[in-house]
Amino acid sequence: MKIQIINGPNLNLLGVREPSIYGNTSIEDYVKELKSIYPLIEIDYYQSNVEGELINKLHEIGFSYDGIVLNAGGYTHTSVAIADAISAIKTPVVEVHISNIYAREEYRHVSLTGKNCQGVLTGFGMKGYRLAIESLLG
């Protein structure tokens, strides 16, 4: 089984960015932990701050991977193009948000991408990535 984790803008700063919201763990360390929890699953990680690069990655793997865990960051609330890319691919996508988007600013309460995903996890911290993988395992 192959699962791709895709993170959007500013998530390259996990572990140092607003630790009161996002915690102290880097995504690199957390992905290592996920790989140790799921040794039989190929887990790949990709991050970009550029909308078009995220769309290109979805297109690249959206017909060959078994699942995608997507945290589109701020693009969740603004990108019709990423929503369309999710809709265009066959691989199931689970949307993840580290913070509870409904407990934050009102503009974060709307997810343009979530309607095209298999499910949405919000507010579980980094554990949301593991929960998303679990949901993809069936």
Image: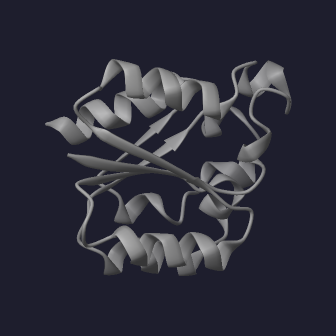
Q: Position of residue 73 (x, y in %)?
A: 66, 52
Asked where in the image residue 27 lies, by quadrant, the reply is top right
Q: Position of residue 92 (x, y in %)?
A: 27, 58
Tally the marks. Answer: 0
Instruction: State whether residue 138 appears in this view.
Output: yes
Q: Position of residue 59 (x, y in %)?
A: 41, 78
Q: Residue at x 74, y 45 (%)?
A: 12
Asked where in the image residue 26 lies, by quadrant, the reply is top right
Q: Residue at x 62, y 49 (%)?
A: 109
Instruction: State whether residue 123 appears in this view.
Output: no
Taking 134 as reference, is 65 above or below it? Answer: below
Q: Residue at x 63, y 33 (%)?
A: 28
Q: Quadrant of the C terminus?
A: top left
Taking 24 as reference, is 123 above or below it? Answer: below
Task: Left or right? Give the position of 10 relative to 115.
Answer: right
Task: Left or right? Give the position of 81 relative to 108.
Answer: left
Depth check, front residue: 83 or 111: 83
Question: Which residue is farthest left?
Answer: 138
Q: Position of residue 82 (x, y in %)?
A: 53, 73
Taking 38 as reference, is 10 above or below it? Answer: below
Rendering colour mode: one colour
Q: Residue at x 29, y 52 (%)?
A: 67
